[in-house]
Image (spheres, rainbow, N blue to C red):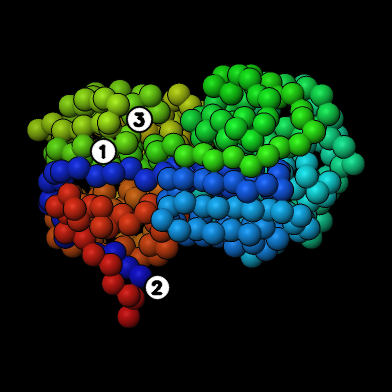
Protein backbone atom coordinates (compact mmCIF):
# COMPACT_ATOMS: atom_id res chain seq x y z
CA UNK A 1 0.00 0.00 0.00
CA UNK A 2 1.33 3.45 -0.95
CA UNK A 3 1.57 6.67 1.03
CA UNK A 4 1.89 10.27 -0.12
CA UNK A 5 4.37 12.65 1.46
CA UNK A 6 4.04 16.41 1.01
CA UNK A 7 6.44 19.09 2.16
CA UNK A 8 4.29 22.17 2.39
CA UNK A 9 4.49 25.92 1.91
CA UNK A 10 4.88 25.81 -1.89
CA UNK A 11 3.22 28.31 -4.21
CA UNK A 12 1.93 26.46 -7.24
CA UNK A 13 2.83 27.97 -10.59
CA UNK A 14 2.60 26.81 -14.19
CA UNK A 15 0.22 24.83 -16.39
CA UNK A 16 -1.57 21.55 -15.79
CA UNK A 17 -3.75 19.55 -18.18
CA UNK A 18 -7.19 18.33 -17.08
CA UNK A 19 -7.82 14.61 -17.62
CA UNK A 20 -11.02 13.15 -19.01
CA UNK A 21 -14.00 12.94 -16.69
CA UNK A 22 -14.19 9.86 -14.46
CA UNK A 23 -17.86 10.41 -13.69
CA UNK A 24 -18.59 10.73 -17.39
CA UNK A 25 -16.61 7.84 -18.83
CA UNK A 26 -17.87 5.13 -16.44
CA UNK A 27 -21.55 5.30 -17.52
CA UNK A 28 -20.46 5.80 -21.14
CA UNK A 29 -18.56 2.51 -20.88
CA UNK A 30 -21.71 0.88 -19.54
CA UNK A 31 -23.72 2.35 -22.42
CA UNK A 32 -21.61 0.34 -24.86
CA UNK A 33 -23.44 -2.77 -23.56
CA UNK A 34 -26.56 -1.54 -25.37
CA UNK A 35 -25.15 -2.60 -28.74
CA UNK A 36 -23.29 -5.48 -30.35
CA UNK A 37 -21.13 -3.10 -32.32
CA UNK A 38 -17.70 -1.63 -31.65
CA UNK A 39 -17.38 1.72 -29.87
CA UNK A 40 -14.35 3.95 -29.33
CA UNK A 41 -14.07 6.26 -26.31
CA UNK A 42 -11.29 8.85 -26.28
CA UNK A 43 -9.84 11.11 -23.56
CA UNK A 44 -10.21 8.35 -20.97
CA UNK A 45 -8.34 8.87 -17.66
CA UNK A 46 -6.12 6.01 -16.50
CA UNK A 47 -7.72 5.44 -13.10
CA UNK A 48 -8.33 2.41 -10.93
CA UNK A 49 -12.11 2.94 -11.31
CA UNK A 50 -11.81 2.84 -15.09
CA UNK A 51 -9.77 -0.37 -14.94
CA UNK A 52 -12.35 -1.89 -12.57
CA UNK A 53 -15.07 -1.11 -15.12
CA UNK A 54 -12.91 -2.63 -17.87
CA UNK A 55 -12.69 -5.87 -15.90
CA UNK A 56 -16.44 -5.82 -15.24
CA UNK A 57 -17.27 -5.43 -18.95
CA UNK A 58 -14.84 -8.23 -19.78
CA UNK A 59 -16.46 -10.43 -17.15
CA UNK A 60 -19.82 -9.81 -18.84
CA UNK A 61 -18.35 -11.03 -22.12
CA UNK A 62 -17.32 -7.84 -23.93
CA UNK A 63 -13.92 -7.39 -25.57
CA UNK A 64 -12.17 -4.31 -24.21
CA UNK A 65 -8.84 -2.71 -25.11
CA UNK A 66 -7.43 0.25 -23.16
CA UNK A 67 -4.35 2.00 -24.51
CA UNK A 68 -3.16 5.62 -24.77
CA UNK A 69 -6.29 6.97 -23.06
CA UNK A 70 -8.50 5.30 -25.65
CA UNK A 71 -11.00 2.52 -25.01
CA UNK A 72 -12.18 0.15 -27.70
CA UNK A 73 -15.23 -1.83 -26.58
CA UNK A 74 -16.75 -4.66 -28.64
CA UNK A 75 -19.68 -6.28 -26.78
CA UNK A 76 -20.58 -8.67 -29.60
CA UNK A 77 -23.10 -11.28 -28.48
CA UNK A 78 -22.13 -11.08 -24.82
CA UNK A 79 -24.18 -13.26 -22.50
CA UNK A 80 -23.31 -12.04 -19.02
CA UNK A 81 -25.96 -10.39 -16.87
CA UNK A 82 -24.30 -10.32 -13.44
CA UNK A 83 -22.18 -7.61 -11.81
CA UNK A 84 -20.79 -9.28 -8.72
CA UNK A 85 -20.01 -7.84 -5.30
CA UNK A 86 -16.31 -8.07 -6.18
CA UNK A 87 -16.72 -5.18 -8.62
CA UNK A 88 -19.64 -3.15 -7.35
CA UNK A 89 -18.49 -3.10 -3.70
CA UNK A 90 -15.35 -1.15 -4.61
CA UNK A 91 -16.96 1.21 -7.12
CA UNK A 92 -20.49 2.50 -6.83
CA UNK A 93 -20.63 3.52 -10.49
CA UNK A 94 -20.70 -0.18 -11.41
CA UNK A 95 -24.44 -0.03 -10.71
CA UNK A 96 -24.84 1.87 -13.99
CA UNK A 97 -24.66 -1.43 -15.88
CA UNK A 98 -28.09 -2.25 -14.45
CA UNK A 99 -30.07 -0.27 -17.04
CA UNK A 100 -28.11 -1.43 -20.11
CA UNK A 101 -28.16 -5.10 -19.04
CA UNK A 102 -31.88 -5.01 -18.39
CA UNK A 103 -32.60 -3.32 -21.73
CA UNK A 104 -30.34 -5.55 -23.81
CA UNK A 105 -30.31 -8.91 -21.99
CA UNK A 106 -33.78 -8.67 -20.39
CA UNK A 107 -32.24 -9.68 -17.07
CA UNK A 108 -29.72 -8.12 -14.69
CA UNK A 109 -28.24 -9.24 -11.39
CA UNK A 110 -26.26 -6.40 -9.86
CA UNK A 111 -24.75 -6.29 -6.41
CA UNK A 112 -25.81 -3.43 -4.19
CA UNK A 113 -23.11 -0.77 -4.61
CA UNK A 114 -20.14 0.26 -2.49
CA UNK A 115 -17.54 2.97 -3.18
CA UNK A 116 -16.64 5.83 -0.85
CA UNK A 117 -17.74 5.79 2.77
CA UNK A 118 -19.60 9.12 2.76
CA UNK A 119 -22.93 8.07 4.21
CA UNK A 120 -25.97 6.29 2.77
CA UNK A 121 -26.44 6.51 -1.01
CA UNK A 122 -29.48 4.36 -1.69
CA UNK A 123 -30.47 2.95 -5.07
CA UNK A 124 -34.17 3.63 -4.58
CA UNK A 125 -34.37 6.03 -7.55
CA UNK A 126 -32.77 3.46 -9.85
CA UNK A 127 -35.39 0.93 -8.77
CA UNK A 128 -38.24 3.45 -9.00
CA UNK A 129 -37.33 4.46 -12.55
CA UNK A 130 -36.80 0.94 -13.87
CA UNK A 131 -40.03 -0.28 -12.30
CA UNK A 132 -41.81 2.60 -14.04
CA UNK A 133 -40.44 1.18 -17.30
CA UNK A 134 -42.03 -2.16 -16.46
CA UNK A 135 -39.15 -4.03 -14.85
CA UNK A 136 -39.72 -6.57 -12.10
CA UNK A 137 -37.07 -5.95 -9.43
CA UNK A 138 -36.33 -7.79 -6.19
CA UNK A 139 -33.52 -7.49 -3.66
CA UNK A 140 -32.13 -10.82 -2.52
CA UNK A 141 -28.89 -11.71 -0.76
CA UNK A 142 -27.39 -8.29 -1.44
CA UNK A 143 -28.27 -8.24 -5.14
CA UNK A 144 -30.71 -6.31 -7.31
CA UNK A 145 -32.42 -8.94 -9.46
CA UNK A 146 -34.23 -7.36 -12.41
CA UNK A 147 -36.27 -8.87 -15.26
CA UNK A 148 -38.29 -7.42 -18.12
CA UNK A 149 -39.53 -9.06 -21.32
CA UNK A 150 -39.98 -5.65 -22.94
CA UNK A 151 -39.41 -2.29 -21.28
CA UNK A 152 -42.20 0.21 -21.90
CA UNK A 153 -41.78 3.98 -22.07
CA UNK A 154 -43.29 5.90 -19.17
CA UNK A 155 -43.53 9.28 -17.49
CA UNK A 156 -41.77 9.49 -14.14
CA UNK A 157 -40.65 11.93 -11.48
CA UNK A 158 -37.11 11.02 -10.44
CA UNK A 159 -36.78 13.08 -7.28
CA UNK A 160 -35.24 11.90 -4.02
CA UNK A 161 -34.76 13.25 -0.53
CA UNK A 162 -31.66 15.20 -1.63
CA UNK A 163 -32.69 16.12 -5.16
CA UNK A 164 -31.98 14.48 -8.48
CA UNK A 165 -29.52 11.61 -8.96
CA UNK A 166 -26.84 11.58 -11.65
CA UNK A 167 -26.36 7.80 -11.71
CA UNK A 168 -30.09 7.06 -11.55
CA UNK A 169 -30.81 9.51 -14.36
CA UNK A 170 -28.12 7.86 -16.47
CA UNK A 171 -29.34 4.35 -15.72
CA UNK A 172 -32.96 5.15 -16.62
CA UNK A 173 -31.95 7.11 -19.72
CA UNK A 174 -29.87 4.18 -20.99
CA UNK A 175 -32.63 1.65 -20.33
CA UNK A 176 -35.23 3.88 -22.00
CA UNK A 177 -33.30 4.07 -25.27
CA UNK A 178 -34.43 0.52 -26.09
CA UNK A 179 -37.85 0.71 -24.42
CA UNK A 180 -41.02 0.70 -26.50
CA UNK A 181 -42.48 4.18 -26.76
CA UNK A 182 -41.63 7.50 -25.15
CA UNK A 183 -40.11 8.07 -21.72
CA UNK A 184 -40.14 11.40 -19.90
CA UNK A 185 -37.94 11.88 -16.84
CA UNK A 186 -38.98 14.82 -14.66
CA UNK A 187 -36.49 16.21 -12.12
CA UNK A 188 -33.71 14.56 -14.06
CA UNK A 189 -30.12 15.43 -13.21
CA UNK A 190 -28.59 17.81 -15.76
CA UNK A 191 -24.94 17.63 -14.68
CA UNK A 192 -22.37 17.84 -17.52
CA UNK A 193 -21.72 14.11 -17.10
CA UNK A 194 -25.38 13.31 -17.84
CA UNK A 195 -25.24 15.53 -20.91
CA UNK A 196 -22.04 13.77 -22.06
CA UNK A 197 -23.67 10.35 -21.67
CA UNK A 198 -26.70 11.54 -23.65
CA UNK A 199 -24.45 12.81 -26.44
CA UNK A 200 -22.80 9.38 -26.65
CA UNK A 201 -26.19 7.65 -26.75
CA UNK A 202 -27.36 9.99 -29.52
CA UNK A 203 -24.27 9.10 -31.56
CA UNK A 204 -25.25 5.45 -31.05
CA UNK A 205 -28.68 6.18 -32.57
CA UNK A 206 -30.76 7.04 -29.50
CA UNK A 207 -33.46 9.71 -29.71
CA UNK A 208 -33.02 12.01 -26.71
CA UNK A 209 -34.11 15.59 -26.10
CA UNK A 210 -33.85 17.96 -23.14
CA UNK A 211 -30.70 16.41 -21.68
CA UNK A 212 -29.39 19.83 -20.63
CA UNK A 213 -32.53 20.42 -18.57
CA UNK A 214 -34.40 18.75 -15.71
CA UNK A 215 -36.86 17.17 -18.17
CA UNK A 216 -35.41 14.53 -20.47
CA UNK A 217 -37.42 12.88 -23.24
CA UNK A 218 -36.34 9.57 -24.79
CA UNK A 219 -38.08 7.93 -27.74
CA UNK A 220 -37.19 4.25 -27.73
CA UNK A 221 -35.58 2.65 -30.79
CA UNK A 222 -35.25 -1.00 -31.84
CA UNK A 223 -31.46 -1.09 -31.73
CA UNK A 224 -28.35 1.00 -31.20
CA UNK A 225 -25.02 0.93 -33.02
CA UNK A 226 -21.42 1.63 -32.13
CA UNK A 227 -20.02 5.16 -31.92
CA UNK A 228 -16.87 7.19 -31.37
CA UNK A 229 -16.88 9.76 -28.58
CA UNK A 230 -14.46 12.02 -26.73
CA UNK A 231 -15.30 12.53 -23.06
CA UNK A 232 -15.50 15.95 -21.45
CA UNK A 233 -12.73 17.19 -19.12
CA UNK A 234 -13.07 16.25 -15.46
CA UNK A 235 -14.60 19.29 -13.77
CA UNK A 236 -13.86 17.93 -10.29
CA UNK A 237 -10.17 17.43 -11.02
CA UNK A 238 -10.06 20.89 -12.62
CA UNK A 239 -11.86 22.37 -9.61
CA UNK A 240 -9.43 20.70 -7.22
CA UNK A 241 -6.47 22.31 -9.01
CA UNK A 242 -8.27 25.66 -9.04
CA UNK A 243 -8.71 25.51 -5.26
CA UNK A 244 -5.09 24.40 -4.85
CA UNK A 245 -3.89 27.42 -6.81
CA UNK A 246 -6.10 29.83 -4.89
CA UNK A 247 -5.27 28.58 -1.39
CA UNK A 248 -1.51 28.44 -2.06
CA UNK A 249 -1.43 32.02 -3.44
CA UNK A 250 -0.35 30.38 -6.66
CA UNK A 251 -0.69 31.22 -10.34
CA UNK A 252 -1.89 28.26 -12.38
CA UNK A 253 -3.48 27.67 -15.78
CA UNK A 254 -5.72 24.60 -15.79
CA UNK A 255 -5.76 23.59 -19.44
CA UNK A 256 -8.97 22.09 -20.76
CA UNK A 257 -11.07 23.22 -17.80
CA UNK A 258 -14.49 24.51 -18.84
CA UNK A 259 -15.90 27.58 -17.10
CA UNK A 260 -19.46 26.58 -18.04
CA UNK A 261 -19.02 23.46 -15.91
CA UNK A 262 -17.56 25.31 -12.92
CA UNK A 263 -19.61 28.47 -12.53
CA UNK A 264 -20.49 28.00 -8.85
CA UNK A 265 -16.86 27.33 -7.90
CA UNK A 266 -15.60 30.30 -9.91
CA UNK A 267 -18.08 32.54 -8.10
CA UNK A 268 -16.94 31.33 -4.67
CA UNK A 269 -13.23 31.57 -5.47
CA UNK A 270 -13.67 35.14 -6.69
CA UNK A 271 -15.39 35.91 -3.39
CA UNK A 272 -12.34 34.61 -1.52
CA UNK A 273 -10.15 37.15 -3.34
CA UNK A 274 -8.78 34.91 -6.09
CA UNK A 275 -8.38 36.28 -9.61
CA UNK A 276 -9.85 34.07 -12.33
CA UNK A 277 -9.81 34.35 -16.11
CA UNK A 278 -11.18 31.80 -18.54
CA UNK A 279 -11.23 31.16 -22.27
CA UNK A 280 -11.74 28.26 -24.61
CA UNK A 281 -8.32 26.84 -23.69
CA UNK A 282 -8.86 26.66 -19.93
CA UNK A 283 -9.02 28.62 -16.69
CA UNK A 284 -6.31 30.70 -15.03
CA UNK A 285 -6.38 31.08 -11.23
CA UNK A 286 -4.20 33.48 -9.28
CA UNK A 287 -4.55 33.42 -5.53
CA UNK A 288 -5.12 36.60 -3.54
CA UNK A 289 -2.84 37.87 -0.79
CA UNK A 290 -5.33 36.70 1.82
CA UNK A 291 -8.28 34.33 1.76
CA UNK A 292 -11.67 35.83 2.56
CA UNK A 293 -14.25 33.52 4.20
CA UNK A 294 -17.25 32.35 2.20
CA UNK A 295 -20.32 30.29 2.97
CA UNK A 296 -20.97 27.31 0.68
CA UNK A 297 -24.02 25.09 0.18
CA UNK A 298 -23.69 22.01 -2.04
CA UNK A 299 -26.53 21.54 -4.52
CA UNK A 300 -27.20 19.67 -7.78
CA UNK A 301 -25.74 21.28 -10.92
CA UNK A 302 -25.43 24.18 -11.57
CA UNK A 303 -25.03 24.55 -7.81
CA UNK A 304 -21.79 24.00 -5.91
CA UNK A 305 -20.65 20.38 -6.45
CA UNK A 306 -20.66 18.03 -3.49
CA UNK A 307 -17.47 16.52 -4.95
CA UNK A 308 -15.66 19.83 -4.25
CA UNK A 309 -17.03 20.30 -0.75
CA UNK A 310 -14.07 18.72 1.05
CA UNK A 311 -11.59 20.75 -0.98
CA UNK A 312 -13.28 24.13 -0.35
CA UNK A 313 -13.51 23.17 3.33
CA UNK A 314 -9.73 22.73 3.38
CA UNK A 315 -9.29 26.16 1.81
CA UNK A 316 -11.57 27.85 4.35
CA UNK A 317 -9.30 26.55 7.13
CA UNK A 318 -6.96 29.42 6.16
CA UNK A 319 -9.59 32.12 5.62
CA UNK A 320 -9.56 35.28 7.73
CA UNK A 321 -12.84 34.74 9.52
CA UNK A 322 -15.58 32.15 9.93
CA UNK A 323 -17.05 30.13 7.08
CA UNK A 324 -19.98 27.71 7.00
CA UNK A 325 -20.02 24.82 4.55
CA UNK A 326 -23.37 23.03 4.31
CA UNK A 327 -23.73 19.63 2.65
CA UNK A 328 -27.17 19.17 1.07
CA UNK A 329 -26.38 16.16 -1.15
CA UNK A 330 -24.68 13.74 1.27
CA UNK A 331 -25.15 15.20 4.78
CA UNK A 332 -22.68 12.74 6.34
CA UNK A 333 -19.88 13.63 3.94
CA UNK A 334 -17.55 15.16 6.51
CA UNK A 335 -15.05 12.39 7.19
CA UNK A 336 -12.22 14.82 6.39
CA UNK A 337 -12.97 17.16 9.28
CA UNK A 338 -11.24 15.16 12.01
CA UNK A 339 -8.11 14.79 9.87
CA UNK A 340 -8.03 18.50 8.99
CA UNK A 341 -8.34 19.30 12.70
CA UNK A 342 -5.28 17.12 13.28
CA UNK A 343 -3.44 19.51 10.99
CA UNK A 344 -4.41 22.56 13.06
CA UNK A 345 -7.81 23.42 11.60
CA UNK A 346 -10.67 24.58 13.83
CA UNK A 347 -13.83 22.95 12.47
CA UNK A 348 -17.00 22.10 14.37
CA UNK A 349 -19.68 19.94 12.79
CA UNK A 350 -23.30 20.86 13.53
CA UNK A 351 -25.77 18.68 11.65
CA UNK A 352 -25.20 19.08 7.94
CA UNK A 353 -22.96 22.14 8.35
CA UNK A 354 -19.27 22.55 9.11
CA UNK A 355 -18.41 25.75 10.96
CA UNK A 356 -14.83 26.68 10.13
CA UNK A 357 -12.82 29.23 12.07
CA UNK A 358 -9.91 30.22 9.85
CA UNK A 359 -6.39 29.81 11.20
CA UNK A 360 -3.10 31.54 10.38
CA UNK A 361 -1.54 28.25 9.39
CA UNK A 362 -1.97 24.51 9.04
CA UNK A 363 0.67 22.02 10.14
CA UNK A 364 1.88 18.85 8.51
CA UNK A 365 0.83 15.66 10.28
CA UNK A 366 0.21 11.95 9.67
CA UNK A 367 -3.37 11.69 8.36
CA UNK A 368 -5.56 8.99 6.85
CA UNK A 369 -7.77 9.28 3.77
CA UNK A 370 -11.35 8.04 4.20
CA UNK A 371 -12.71 8.55 0.69
CA UNK A 372 -11.84 10.00 -2.70
CA UNK A 373 -12.60 13.69 -2.22
CA UNK A 374 -11.50 13.72 1.43
CA UNK A 375 -8.14 12.47 0.13
CA UNK A 376 -7.92 15.48 -2.18
CA UNK A 377 -8.71 17.83 0.71
CA UNK A 378 -5.84 16.38 2.74
CA UNK A 379 -3.48 16.81 -0.21
CA UNK A 380 -4.48 20.47 -0.50
CA UNK A 381 -3.99 21.01 3.22
CA UNK A 382 -0.59 19.36 2.99
CA UNK A 383 0.46 21.65 0.15
CA UNK A 384 0.01 24.75 2.31
CA UNK A 385 0.84 23.28 5.73
CA UNK A 386 4.09 23.81 7.58
CA UNK A 387 6.33 20.75 7.65
CA UNK A 388 5.62 17.36 6.13
CA UNK A 389 2.24 15.67 5.73
CA UNK A 390 2.01 11.90 5.43
CA UNK A 391 -1.23 10.60 3.89
CA UNK A 392 -2.20 6.94 4.21
CA UNK A 393 -4.79 4.96 2.22
CA UNK A 394 -4.20 6.95 -0.96
CA UNK A 395 -5.73 4.19 -3.07
CA UNK A 396 -8.83 6.37 -2.78
CA UNK A 397 -7.00 9.11 -4.71
CA UNK A 398 -6.07 6.70 -7.48
CA UNK A 399 -9.77 6.06 -8.08
CA UNK A 400 -10.37 9.63 -9.26
CA UNK A 401 -7.14 11.56 -9.89
CA UNK A 402 -4.77 10.59 -12.69
CA UNK A 403 -1.10 11.00 -11.68
CA UNK A 404 -1.95 13.67 -9.12
CA UNK A 405 1.50 13.78 -7.55
CA UNK A 406 3.22 14.18 -10.92
CA UNK A 407 0.84 16.96 -11.92
CA UNK A 408 1.31 18.83 -8.64
CA UNK A 409 5.08 18.33 -8.78
CA UNK A 410 5.10 19.92 -12.24
CA UNK A 411 3.59 23.01 -10.59
CA UNK A 412 6.33 23.17 -7.96
CA UNK A 413 4.85 21.08 -5.18
CA UNK A 414 7.20 18.94 -3.10
CA UNK A 415 5.19 15.72 -3.20
CA UNK A 416 6.18 12.07 -3.59
CA UNK A 417 4.83 8.55 -3.21
CA UNK A 418 6.39 5.75 -1.17
CA UNK A 419 5.50 2.16 -0.47
CA UNK A 420 4.23 1.67 3.06
CA UNK A 421 6.82 -0.13 5.19
Q: For the C terminus, which image quadrant? A: bottom left
- 2 or 3: tag closer to the N-terminus: 2
Q: Are marks 3 and 1 in contact (CB under 8 Å)?
A: no
Residue farthest along the bottom direction in this orientation:
421
- Crowd rating for badge 3 (residues with CA inside 10 Å; few <14, some 14–19, many 20+): many
Q: Is 363 rendered above or below residue 268?
A: below
Q: Quadrant of residue 388?
A: bottom left
Q: Secondary structure at mark 2?
A: loop
Q: Which residue is mark 2?
A: 1
Residue 201 in percent (x, y) is at: 62, 34
- Residue under the image location 76 percent in, 28 percent down: 220
Question: For the residue carrying disc 1, how many other residues have a C-alpha within 10 Å: few (<14), some (14-19), or many (20+)?
Answer: many
Residue 267 point in image, percent of width and height: 30, 23
Return the x and y of residue 321 as percentages of the image width and height.
21, 31
Left or right: where 56 falls relative to 337? right
Q: Is residue 309 visible?
A: no
Q: Residue at x 35, y 70 (%)?
A: 2
Which residue is denoted by mark 1 in the rendering? 254
> In this picture, is 397 found above or below 248?
below
Q: Looking at the image, can residue 274 be seen?
A: yes
- What is the secondary structure assignment of the residue under circle 1? strand
Q: Nearer the viewer, residue 168 or 304?
A: 168
Distance between the Cα atoms at labels 3 and 1? Answer: 9 Å
Q: Which residue is mark 3?
A: 258
Q: Judge left or right: residue 36 versus residue 359.
A: right
The percent position of residue 333, horizontal first and vertical second, equals 47, 44
Q: Is residue 70 above or below residue 191?
A: below
Amino acid sequence: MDKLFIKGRSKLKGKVRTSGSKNSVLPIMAACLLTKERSVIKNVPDLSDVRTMVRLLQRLGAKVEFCDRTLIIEPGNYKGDTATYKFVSVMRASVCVLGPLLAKQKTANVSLPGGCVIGPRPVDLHIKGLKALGADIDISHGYLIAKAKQLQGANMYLGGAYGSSVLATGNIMMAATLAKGKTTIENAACEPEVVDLAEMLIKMGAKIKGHKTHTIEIEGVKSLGGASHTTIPDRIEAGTFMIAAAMSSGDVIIEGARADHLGALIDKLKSTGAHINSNTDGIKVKGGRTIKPVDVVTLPFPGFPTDLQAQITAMMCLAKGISIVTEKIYPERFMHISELNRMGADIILEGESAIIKGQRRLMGAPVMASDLRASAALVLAGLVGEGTTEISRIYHLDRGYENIEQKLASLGAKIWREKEK
